Image (spheres, rainbow, N blue to C red):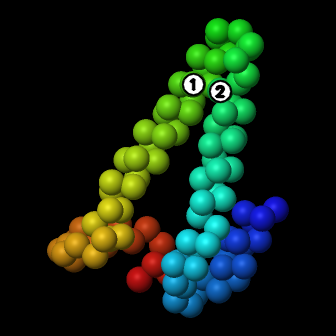
Amino acid sequence: AGLAAGYLPWLLFSERTIFTFYTVAFAPWLMLCLAYVMALVIGPAGADRERRLAGGLFVGSLLLLIVLVSAFFWPVWTGQVLDVDQWRYRMWLPSWT
């Protein structure tokens, strides 16, 4: 509920400029929630081997995807110089520009 309260109000104003630095206040809690859910997906220490292996593979794949997407958007987040085509390639939604 707290995560939804942090993100959902911004969806009402998607046509306006949104300064995402406001999300810094709840980013640590988001990371804790993600870690907790990933631990639940992997399963308890007493779970059978197949369950933990499947959960670990899923969580590992998710983490790899997060790292790859972060690397893709890193130049935008850090204000690096991009040519116009590279910039447009990273602007997936019209409201992002």
Locate residue 33, reporting x and y percent.
68, 50
Which residue: 64% across, 9% down?
49
Q: Nearer the viewer, residue 97 or 24?
A: 24
**Furthest residue to the top?**
49
State the mark number for residue 82: none
Query: Which residue in the structure is indicated by mark 2?
Result: 42
How dense is the environment of label 2, judged by Cα within 10 Å: few (below 14), some, or many (20 and up)?
some
Quadrant of the image containing the C terminus: bottom left
Along the line of sight, which residue is nearer the eye, 30 or 64?
Answer: 30
Count the numbered circles shown. 2
Looking at the image, residue 57 lies above or below residue 39: above
Q: Is residue 74 among what the camera can see?
A: yes
Few, some or many residues within 10 Å of mark 1 (<14, 14–19, 20+): some
Amino acid type, residue under disc 2 in the picture: Ile
19 sits left or right of 97 in the view: right
The residue furthest bottom is: 16
Mark 1 lies on residue: 56
Displayed quadrant of residue 64: top left
Identified by mark 1, the residue type is: Gly
Q: x%, y% of residue 6?
A: 70, 71
